[in-house]
């Protein structure tokens, strides 16, 4: 998505300008904001993918059982 936004930045800004008659700063923001979100997501993704502990019923916990959620991405 970031590649598509970067490659078509001028087209997006022109289209936004025609559709909404916005100022230059707003046109730039309409592309920069999603790019910033994508960058932040990419930076956090490894941490978000770490396994996390999950609750288990008391009876299982008392006998020493534990549970973890192991995340994986759907695109393979």
Image: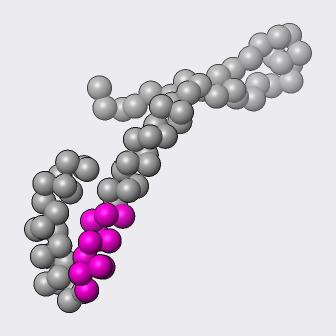
In this picture, is 48 found above or below 34? above
In this picture, is 26 found above or below 72? below
Give the dominant element type of the magenta stretch: helix, strand or loop: helix
Residue at 16% in and 68% down? 12
Q: How far from the left and from the top, in percent, is residue 10?
A: 12, 67
Task: Tell which of 27 and 54 is nearer to you.
Answer: 27
Q: How far from the left and from the top, in percent, is residue 60?
A: 81, 16
Residue at 40% in and 31% down? 73
Task: Tell which of 41 and 63 is nearer to you.
Answer: 41
Toward the top, the furthest residue is 63
Task: Tell which of 52 and 54 is nearer to you.
Answer: 52
Image quadrant assignment for residue 30: bottom left
Side of 15 relative to 71 (left or right):
left
Task: Tell which of 63 and 48 is nearer to you.
Answer: 48
In this picture, is 55 found above or below 33? above
Q: How far from the left and from the top, in percent, is residue 37?
A: 40, 55
**Chain part drawn in magenta:** 23-33
Report the number of numbered marks. 0
Q: Quadrant of the C terminus?
A: top left
């Amino acid at each position: 998505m970031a590649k598509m936004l970067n490659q078509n930045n001028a087209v997006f800004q022109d289209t936004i300008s025609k559709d909404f008659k916005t100022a230059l700063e707003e046109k730039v923001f309409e592309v920069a904001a999603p790019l910033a979100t994508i960058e932040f997501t990419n930076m956090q993704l490894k941490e978000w993918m770490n396994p996390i502990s999950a609750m288990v019923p008391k009876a299982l916990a008392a006998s020493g059982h534990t549970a973890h959620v192991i995340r994986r991405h759907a695109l393979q």
